[in-house]
């Protein structure tokens, strides 16, 4: 009887533990879900909360358009192609025998779910290799207050770069970076940096690009901090 009594006590103890665990588990799951539903710090890049000194030199876009996210990338790019072509036509850029400048594009696509957009300060970096050396452009402004990086939208930008006083024979994009300042998190689905022959003011061939699909949150815990996503290793070469 003594052995039987011990056995029953062990069994009842095991049942009690199972009951306690099964009762506590739904609460922990609910807490986890609620934490995510209420937002908060979302970045997992490992690059958040970086303090960057203000840079005086900035690159301002020549063009920016925002397009609905229900357009495919092909459709959105075609619309931007037409806008750029009209801009270049009106600029009346002279055709030269050598290229002392080149034009490049940046495109972003913001996530489609609630809270994916941002009004935060967004910057980019583009890194080029040419036959005359490497050019790093690190303070590219991708920010029109209250006008871009809206939920489920495309944003397209056109920029110009050059080596002052030098002509280049070819250009390659070798790296690109996207950055967000502040605590208004942004979910970046797509981020592309690329060059096409049609945008250039001298005859050109080929193309060069970095197409990325980050699917990451950029976010910080302080208003003056920066978070970033970077990609190295571009493709192709644009030759003049």
Image (spheres, helix red, strand yellow):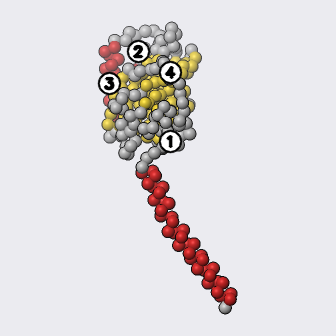
Residue 153 visible in image: yes
Q: Looking at the image, do the residues carrying marks 4 and 2 touch, with CB atoms under 8 Å apart?
A: no
Which of the two labelled residues, at mark 2 and mark 1, occupies the earlier sequence position?
Answer: 1
Instruction: Write down the residue under mark 1.
Output: 43
Name the foreground residue: 29 vs 73: 29
Instruction: Write down the residue under mark 4.
Output: 55
Q: For the point 38% across and 20% down, which residue is it?
A: 62
Which of the two labelled residues, at mark 3 and mark 4, occupies the earlier sequence position?
Answer: 4
> Counting other residues with Cα less than 10 Å from the Cα at mark 2, is it few (<14), some (14-19), or many (20 or more)?
many
Labelled disc at residue 201: 2
Give how far across and how far down residue 227 sits, in percent: 51, 35
Give how far across and how far down residue 177 sits, in percent: 51, 30
Instruction: Write down the residue under mark 3.
Output: 83
Give how far across and how far down residue 231 sits, in percent: 53, 33
Q: For the point 56% across and 39% down, which residue is it?
A: 46
Report the mark closest to the observer, 1 or 3: 1
Which of the two labelled residues, at mark 1 and mark 3, occupies the earlier sequence position?
Answer: 1
């Amino acid at each position: 009887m003594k052995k039987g009594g011990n056995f029953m006590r062990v069994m009842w103890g095991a049942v009690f533990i199972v009951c306690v665990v099964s009762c506590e588990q739904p609460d922990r799951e609910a807490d986890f879900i609620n934490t995510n539903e209420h937002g908060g710090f979302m970045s997992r890049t490992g690059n958040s909360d970086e303090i960057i000194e203000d840079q005086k030199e900035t690159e301002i876009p020549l063009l920016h358009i925002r397009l609905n996210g229900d357009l495919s990338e092909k459709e959105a790019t075609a619309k931007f192609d037409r806008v750029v072509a009209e801009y270049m036509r009106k600029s009346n850029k002279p055709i030269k025998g050598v290229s002392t400048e080149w034009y490049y594009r940046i495109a972003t696509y913001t996530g489609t779910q609630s809270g994916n957009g941002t009004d935060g300060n967004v910057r980019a970096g583009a890194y080029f290799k040419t036959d005359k050396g490497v050019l790093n452009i690190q303070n590219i402004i991708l920010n029109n207050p209250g006008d871009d990086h809206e939920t489920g939208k495309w944003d397209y930008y056109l920029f110009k770069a050059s080596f002052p006083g030098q002509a280049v024979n070819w250009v390659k994009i070798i790296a690109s970076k996207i950055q967000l300042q502040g605590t208004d998190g942004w979910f970046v689905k797509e981020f592309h940096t690329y060059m096409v022959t049609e945008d250039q003011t001298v005859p050109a061939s080929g193309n060069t690009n970095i197409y990325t699909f980050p699917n990451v949150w950029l976010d910080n815990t302080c208003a003056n901090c920066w978070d970033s996503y970077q990609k190295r290793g571009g493709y192709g070469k644009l030759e003049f």
